Image: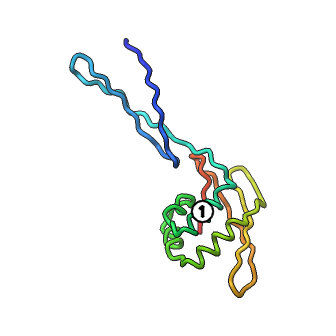
C-alpha cells in the first residue's frame, strides 16, 4: 500500500460544501478515491453583520446584502423593491444597532429608524446563527 500526503489550501468567503476527490495514475490506469465533502464554516463576528448589510444597501448592492439574509422569495423581493431613500434609512438604522438580548444561536439588536418628517422608531432585528456558523437575518 502506498501512502502520501498533499496539503492544499482552500479559500471560501461564504459557507459552502466543497467536494474533493483524488486520483492517481498507476501503470497507465487512473484510479479515483471516493468523493469527500468538506464543509466550510465561517467564523463571523455577529456585531459586524448589520454594519456590513448597511454598506451593501448604501451602495445599492442588493445581491451583496442578500448574503446576510436567510434567502426566500419574500426577502429577495422586499430588498429589490427598496428605493434609494429607504435603503439609506435602513442602512443608517443598522449602524445604530445595540445588542439587547442574546440566547444560544439568536442575537437581538435594537435599531433606530429615522424617517423624514416623522418620529424615530425603535425596531428589533434578530440574527440567527446557521449550522455553517454564519449569522443571518431571518426575515425582512
> In the visual, does 34 lie left or right of 59?
left
Farthest-out residue, right: 100
The image quadrant that residue 122 belongs to is bottom right
- Of the pair 103 and 89, the residue shown nearer to us: 89
| Above-or-below relation of 103 to 137 | above
Residue 113, given in percent of the width and then of the height, sits at: 70, 75
Q: Is residue 79 above or below residue 4?
A: below
Q: Quadrant of residue 28?
A: top left
SS state under label 1: helix
**Which residue has dot 1 on it?**
53
Residue 4, compared with residue 75, is above or below; it is: above
Q: Indicate the position of residue 43 as horizontal and vertical percent values.
A: 62, 44
Residue at the left extreme, as displayed: 28
**Number of on-image labels:** 1
Q: Quadrant of residue 89?
A: bottom right
Q: How is colour applied across the structure in the image?
A: rainbow
Image quadrant for the C terminus? Answer: bottom right
Which residue is the extreme one toward the bottom?
A: 117
Residue name at image x 45 percent, y 30 percent: 8
Crowding at dot 1, Cα within 10 Å, few <14 / some 14-19 / many 20+, comes out as: many
Residue 126's spot in the image, x, y percent? 68, 62
Q: Position of residue 21 (x, y in %)?
A: 37, 32
Instruction: Find the residue positioned furthest to the top.
Output: 1
Q: Is residue 124 left or right of residue 53?
A: right
Q: Residue at x 48, y 68 (%)?
A: 73
Amino acid at each position: 500500500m502506498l501512502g502520501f500526503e498533499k496539503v492544499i489550501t482552500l479559500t471560501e468567503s461564504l459557507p459552502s460544501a466543497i467536494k474533493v476527490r483524488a486520483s492517481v495514475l498507476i501503470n497507465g490506469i487512473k484510479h479515483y478515491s471516493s468523493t469527500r465533502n468538506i464543509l466550510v464554516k465561517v467564523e463571523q463576528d455577529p456585531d459586524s453583520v448589520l454594519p456590513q448589510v448597511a454598506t451593501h444597501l448604501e451602495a445599492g448592492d442588493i445581491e451583496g446584502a442578500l448574503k446576510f439574509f436567510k434567502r426566500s422569495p419574500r426577502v429577495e423581493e422586499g430588498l429589490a423593491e427598496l428605493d434609494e431613500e429607504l435603503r439609506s434609512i435602513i442602512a443608517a438604522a443598522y449602524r445604530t444597532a445595540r445588542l439587547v438580548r442574546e440566547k444560544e444561536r439568536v442575537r437581538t439588536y435594537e435599531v433606530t429608524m429615522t424617517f423624514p418628517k416623522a418620529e424615530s422608531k425603535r425596531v428589533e432585528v434578530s440574527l440567527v446563527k446557521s449550522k455553517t456558523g454564519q449569522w443571518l437575518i431571518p426575515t425582512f
